Image: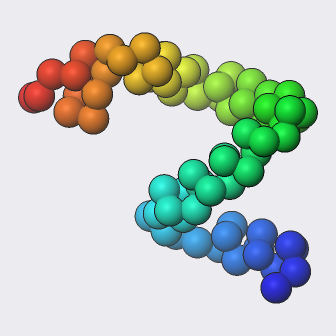
Amino acid sequence: MKFEEIKKAILELSPEDRLRLMREVGPELWESMMTDPDAMAQMMPQCREMTSRHPEMMVRMREMMSGTCGPEGQAGRKR
């Protein structure tokens, strides 16, 4: 498949399948990206745009990265 065909197919996925794709394929893509010193700099404009549209997700990401929030719920507490 060509890149544009793959892109079109991904964009046509259901939200559930997009999430599944990110979970299953995302780690491999990120690993490839981490080997390119300029990759993160190239992604920063998209990251800034996404977080400006969804500031609550930036708060959540900070919590997760600092270890204060786990999959069980806020601050790692089970509900």
| Residue furthest out toward the bottom | 1
Rendered residue at 87%/74% (across/down): 4
Q: Give the colour scheme shown.
A: rainbow
Q: Position of residue 78 (x, y in %)?
A: 11, 28
Rendered residue at 22%/22% (across/down): 76
Please tell me which residue lies in front, 44 or 48: 44
Instruction: Give residue 54's quadrant in the image.
Output: top right
Question: Is residue 73 at least partly visible in the picture?
Answer: yes
**In the picture provided, is 12 more to the left or to the right than 5?**
left
Question: Is residue 49 at least partly visible in the picture?
Answer: no
Q: Position of residue 6 (x, y in %)?
A: 76, 75
**Could you tell me how many numbered marks the image carries?**
0
| Residue furthest out toward the front | 35
The quadrant of the rendering that contains the C terminus is top left
**In the picture provided, is 12 more to the left or to the right than 4?**
left
Q: Is residue 34 above or below residue 15?
A: above
Q: Position of residue 22 (x, y in %)?
A: 55, 56
Rendered residue at 67%/70% (across/down): 10
